[in-house]
Image: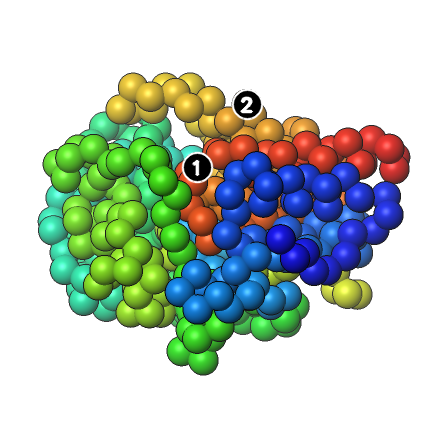
Amino acid sequence: MKRSGFADERFGAVADAFSRNFAEYGELGAAVTVFVDGRKVVELWGGVADGRTGRPWAQDTVVPVFSCAKGLVGVCAHLLAQQGNLDLDAPVSRYWPEFARGGKEAITCRMVLGHRAGLPALDPVLGFEEIAAWTPVIHAIEEQEPLWEPGTAYEYHGHVFGFLIGEVIRRVTGLTPGAYFRRVAGEPLGLRAWIGLPAGEMEGRARLVEAEGRPRMPGPDHLLTRIVTMNGALVFPGLDEPHGWNDPALLGMELPGAGATASASGLAGLYAAAVSGVEGHERLLTPDTVTDAVCEVSSGKGWLGFDAGARWGSGFLLDSAFRPMLGERSFGNDGAGGQFAFGDDEFGVGFAYVANRMIGHGDARAGRLVEAVRKCLAVVS
């Protein structure tokens, strides 16, 4: 495997781990970026971006990163809270009055960010075009009744997370979440990360492939499948089918719960900007805002009875056995293909790993890289 890029000599272990991933986990194409205190100390990429043509992965290659999108949305929500424009503990209906229907009047943004709102999936079966149009999803959320008493249990909210918090962002700012993210972070910081990939970026993106033996989804009526596919409207994992995750029509629409497309540098740059600032910009999130984000909201068994070991703060995964990071100030999100990005303001780290060979949530590739970062920091500090 030809590897390109650089690693600061103090972070050579990250480069070694990146190379071993290709040798031991069958990587097709991948990239990893690490910032420390606003300075890029690792930027590596290698392999193939498009297995059909052999096109190599480039420094700026972007790839679908699935639920890493929740990190973009979470940063936006906390920015609005930090500015005093959004109270995460106020009822959602303060900003979106129609939301209060169906017994949802007490649901807060923090319940949604912590997957405790009782709205992991929607009852209506919406078509692909309806989902792309945004408003039909919002109307369905308004009419939806919670599956449990809000605040009393949690279960992963998948796509609803993004549409619900995204509509609050739209009500507060007048911009959909993808547009708001680009205005406050993506464009000012030059980040190659989008919720809704522009047409001009489609040709150079990496194409996803599915690893052999990847676990299958349960049947179409199972709640987990409904959460991930929006009742079957979005094919998963189906990649090259219409409405699959290599389909430009899907990648170009705003799916703020699971539809981001980004480079490793773009995702790591966002978290670095959040926790330390980059390139002369002040940090996006203050220490108090990070403290609020990393307070545990949910953990243990979800409503479906599974306990993967994950811990959730307000909008982000926290350091846990499921996703080991650097410590109690770490916060991030991962993607269905094994992609992972996080920040930590104690260590000043912004980290991201992306790949186009989909193995799964929590597979060992990103964890191996994070462990290498952890060891390098122990040497440096």
Q: Secondary structure at mark 2?
A: loop
Residue 201 vertical position relative to residue 193 in the rendered view, above or below: below
Q: How is the image coloured?
A: rainbow
Question: Residue 292, image x and y in percent?
Answer: 59, 38
| Foreground residue among 148 and 229 | 229
Question: Residue 44, image x and y in percent?
Answer: 68, 55
Q: Amino acid at mark 2?
A: Ala
Classify mark 1: residues with Cα within 10 Å, few (<14), some (14-19) or many (20+): some
Question: Which disc is residue 321 wearing?
Answer: 2
- Name the residue rendered at 28%, 60% in the picture: 240
Residue 218 vertical position relative to residue 240 in the rendered view, above or below: above
* Residue at the extreme bottom of the image, as rendered: 200
* Of labels 2 and 1, the one closer to you: 1
Question: Which residue is the site of mark 1?
Answer: 361
Q: Secondary structure at mark 1?
A: loop
| Foreground residue among 197 and 98 | 197
